[in-house]
Image (cartoon, helix red, strand yellow):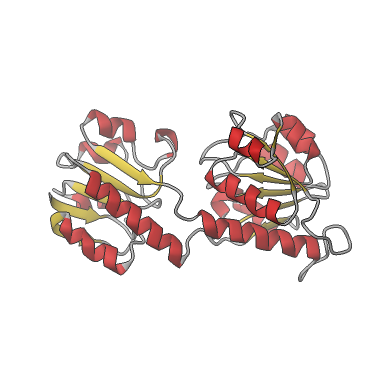
Amino acid sequence: MFRKLVAIEPVSLVPSAEKALNNYAEEVVVHTDIPADDEEIIARIGDADAVLLSYTSQIDRYVLERCPNIRYIGMCCSLYSPESANVDIRFANERGITVTGIRDYGDEGVIEYVVSELVRCLHGFEQEPWERMPREITGLKVGIVGLGKSGGMIADALKFFGAEIAYFARNEKPAAAEKGYRFMPLDELLSWSEAVFCCLNKNTVLLHEAEFEALGNRKILFNTGLSPAWDEAPFARWLEGDNLCFCDTLGALGDAKFLAHPHVRCMQVSTGRTRQAFDRLSEKVLANLSEYDG
C-alpha cells in the first residue's frame, strides 16, 4: 500500500473507482482542476509516493527531480510509447519509478463517430452529398493507415456496410488477410482509396508531400489519432483541392487556423470520451494499481 496517492488533475475515474483508490493508499488526494504549471504540479505531489494524471499535464525531468518520494505514476490516459507520453518515462525508470498507462478504452466511441460522419457525408444529411447524389458505403474503396485496435475496428465496421477494405501497416497481418483485407504499400493505398482513415499513434506522421501527391484530389480523409498524421504544409495545399478532412479534436487537426477551412469538419469533441469509456478507463487504472508490486 502507498503512503500517499495524489491525482494531480481530473483523471475521469467513475465515482466507485475513485472511492476504491482508498484501498491502495493510506491517504488519497484528488484534485479537480488542472495545475497551472510545473511548480503547482510539484506542490500538489509534495511527499506523495504515488501519482495519477491524465493527458492534460506533463511530468518531466524537472518535476521528477523535485519529487523524490515518487514510486509509482499511473497515467489515466493512452500510453503508446515513451516518446509520445506526457511523462518522462525513461528518466522515471532510471529513478526506479514504475510508470503505467492504459490503452483501448475509448475506441468504440471513435468508431461510431467515423461511421456517423461518413454516412452523413455520403448521403448528404444537412450537407451536399459527396457524389452530388446520395450513395451508400457499399463498394466504397476504404484505405486504413495503421491497422491497430481502432483501425481494425473501423475496417470491420465499414466491411459490414459493404466497403472494400485495404490497409497499410508496418507488417502484413494474417488475420486481416483472412477477412479479405488487402495489404498495400502506402502510396498505392492512398492512390487507390476513395476514403482514407489514419489510425496512428500520437506523434506518428506518415503523410508528407509525396503521400499527398499520391492521395490526389476528390478524396475523404479521416484522422482518428491524437495528433496530426501529416506535415502541415502539404496538408494545407491538399485542402485547397476538392477534398474533405474529418477529425474529432483540434489535437488531431493541428493548427487552429484550419478550423474555419470549408473543407475541414472538426467537431472539437473527443468522441472516445463516453460513459462506457470511463468505465473501461477506471477498470484499467485500478488493475494497474493492483498489479504494482513495488
Q: Residue furthest right?
A: 132
Name which quarter of the figure residue 262 lies in: bottom right
Front position in the image: 179 or 136: 179
Front position in the image: 67 or 157: 157
Front position in the image: 107 or 263: 107
Q: Could you say where residue 26 lies in the image, as x and y percent from the top left?
A: 10, 56
Front position in the image: 208 or 65: 208
Residue 17 vs residue 193: left or right?
left
Name which quarter of the figure residue 181 lies in: top right
Residue 278 vs residue 53: left or right?
right
Residue placed at 83% from the left, 61% from the top? 135
Circle count: 0
Name which quarter of the figure residue 229 lies in: top right
Residue placed at 68% from the left, 61% from the top? 117
Residue 49 vs residue 119: left or right?
left
Q: Could you say where residue 189 lies in the image, as x and y percent from the top left?
A: 74, 35
Q: Quadrant of the C terminus?
A: top left
Q: Name above or below for residue 161 compared with residue 189.
A: below
Q: Could you say where residue 121 lies in the image, as x and y percent from the top left?
A: 76, 61
Residue 42 appears anywhere in the view: no
Residue 133 appears anywhere in the view: yes
Residue placed at 76% from the left, 41% from the top? 237
Q: Name above or below for residue 93 compared with residue 134.
A: above
Q: Could you say where residue 235 lies in the image, as x and y percent from the top left?
A: 70, 41
